[in-house]
Image: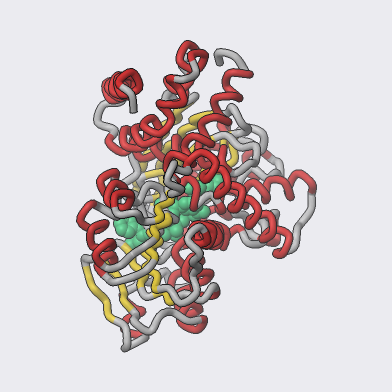
């Protein structure tokens, strides 16, 4: 990077940090993108003059609201609701809703910012947003979750709509929560529209939306491996998380011939040296969906496996790692363990699971490494396909949806290669994804004037 560009990045980041104090995750996400696209920006005086990147880091709108609800004993609780509408240059705001006690403004802003770039990569017309609450669904009854969702939507409904902002699921928000949110939205608006995605199959949902993030991650990883003449067949795979993304990533990796040996949750991980199979996967689906159980129970059910409380899976030797739990779950020491254990490829199912120091370790050691905004874009892409089906009042077959998903993941991979291939033929997927995504958003913003 030349000194003019270095200076631009330093000044830009100093300004972002001063304007958004204490928002560490947001700073981290912005720095990664700015470091990638600064050479492009400084070579385009019109983008500098019109302050396009300065505008992108200032969300178009941020909503913060009170969410009061009562538990089953009648006790009153107050949570905080968020919706960060980051950028609408490419289409209606689009992005998930997260219910987790760690949710705060920094996390919402980093996710909405990442979503803007991810959605740009999908080739579909979607802007970027994220929302959520510090509500913890763990241990709550269905009725409590329903009352919370209804209260959350009672404020959110006035800010969203099928042509305005289309939320979906994320951590702590799956089919059950989308159902309750949709029911309340429909009641308040007296309209049946496709304003949320991830809906049930009988009422406007798309086939393969639940599977899409995990499946898309594996399709993308196959393409990465293909650049080195490799595939999933015979590879040992570590997966973190045991939720929506982790489950379907495990199922697809396994079906592509890999041996998946770990799953995890925030309490610990299980290691199954024999690998998951269809029967074990069916057990995990039931454990999580029906019983809302913990991954620890897997080790009780399958005695060949071991549960390691309080640990993450990254010290287990592997060929491929697919982090599918949460942000910053792979730190420098974890990345070093992955390298020492023989890992050749890391593709992110979660959003920003690797710290900048961990990414540095991967890149220095020549691993194939893909950032989540490229490799986990299959989920929001299939949400985009759900929106298309809702608009057309049609329902596509699983084969149709899957062929769109494969094409989109392959197009995203091609965009990463186009902008991320180094002179020596290796690929920097971070630079590739960020540059391809930025160009599309920036061009649209230039076309639409100073808004
Ligand atoms: P789920 O709620 O279905 O599952 C989340 C999993 O991650 C759970 O096993 C959970 O464990 C674990 N987890 C959550 N927070 C932490 C934490 N702080 N530390 C350790 N483990 C944690 O969520 P999803 O599978 O939908 O989301 C997982 C990741 O994928 C997130 O980063 C999300 O943003 C990203 N993503 C999701 C998409 C989707 O379509 N759902 C699309 C693209 C990305 P526990 O039960 O203990 O909390
Ligand atoms: O991070 C993500 O891409 C998601 N949680 C999915 C968003 C969506 O609108 O489907």
- Say which quadrant the N terminus sits in: top left
* Residue 402 position within the rendered picture, expressed as x and y whole percent measured from the top left: 66, 61
In terms of image quarters, where does ligand 1 lie?
bottom left
* Residue 229 position within the rendered picture, expressed as x and y whole percent measured from the top left: 50, 64
Q: Looking at the image, is 324 positioned above or below residue 261? A: above
Q: Which of 363 and 130 is in front in this view?
A: 363
Can residue 187 be seen in the rendering of this structure? no
**Residue 325, quarter of picture:** bottom left
Say whether residue 285 is left or right of residue 187. left
Residue at (29% x, 54% y) in the render:
365
Say whether residue 207 is left or right of residue 44. right
**Coloured how?**
secondary structure
* Residue 41 position within the rendered picture, expressed as x and y whole percent measured from the top left: 45, 22
Residue at (63% x, 55% y) in the render:
405
- Say which quadrant the C terminus sits in: top right
**Residue 445, quarter of picture:** top right
Q: Nearer the viewer, residue 136 or 398?
A: 398
């Amino acid at each position: 990077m030349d000194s003019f560009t270095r200076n631009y990045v330093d000044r830009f980041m100093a300004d972002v940090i001063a304007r958004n104090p204490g928002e560490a995750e947001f700073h981290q996400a912005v720095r990664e993108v700015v470091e990638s696209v600064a050479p492009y920006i400084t070579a385009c005086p019109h983008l500098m003059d019109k302050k396009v990147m300065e505008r992108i880091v200032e969300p178009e709108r941020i909503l913060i609201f009170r969410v009061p609800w009562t538990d089953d004993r009648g006790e009153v609780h107050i949570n905080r609701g968020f919706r960060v509408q980051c950028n609408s240059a490419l289409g209606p705001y689009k992005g998930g809703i997260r219910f987790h006690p760690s949710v705060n403004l920094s996390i919402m802003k980093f996710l909405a910012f990442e979503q803007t770039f991810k959605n740009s990569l999908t080739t579909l017309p979607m802007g970027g947003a994220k929302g959520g609450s510090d509500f913890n669904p763990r241990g709550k009854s269905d009725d409590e979750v329903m009352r919370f969702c209804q209260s959350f939507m009672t404020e959110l409904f006035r800010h969203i709509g099928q042509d305005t902002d289309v939320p979906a699921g994320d951590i702590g928000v799956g089919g059950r929560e989308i159902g309750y949110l949709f029911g309340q939205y429909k009641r308040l608006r007296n309209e049946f529209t496709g304003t949320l995605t991830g809906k049930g199959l009988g009422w406007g949902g798309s086939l393969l939306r639940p599977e899409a993030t995990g499946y898309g991650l594996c399709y993308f990883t196959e393409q990465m491996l293909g650049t080195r003449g490799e595939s999933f067949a015979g590879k040992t795979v570590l997966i973190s998380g045991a939720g929506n993304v982790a489950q379907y990533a495990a199922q697809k990796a396994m079906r592509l011939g890999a041996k998946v040996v770990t799953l995890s949750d925030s309490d610990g991980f299980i290691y199954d040296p024999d690998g998951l199979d269809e029967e074990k996967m069916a057990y995990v689906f039931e454990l999580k969906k029906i019983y809302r159980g913990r991954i620890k129970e897997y080790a009780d059910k399958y005695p060949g496996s071991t549960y390691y409380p309080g640990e993450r899976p990254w010290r287990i030797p592997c060929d491929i790692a697919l982090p599918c739990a949460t942000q910053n779950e792979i730190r420098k020491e974890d990345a070093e363990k992955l390298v020492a254990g023989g890992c050749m490829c890391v593709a992110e199912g979660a959003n920003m699971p690797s710290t900048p120091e961990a990414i540095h370790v991967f890149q220095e050691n020549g691993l194939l490494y893909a950032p989540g905004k490229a490799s986990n874009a299959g989920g929001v892409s299939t949400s985009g396909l759900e929106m298309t089906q809702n608009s057309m009042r049609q329902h596509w077959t699983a084969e149709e949806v899957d062929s769109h998903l494969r094409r989109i993941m392959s197009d995203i991979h091609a965009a990463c290669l186009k902008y991320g291939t180094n002179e020596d033929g290796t690929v920097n997927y971070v630079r590739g994804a960020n540059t391809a995504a930025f160009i599309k958003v920036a061009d649209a913003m230039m076309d639409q004037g100073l808004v």
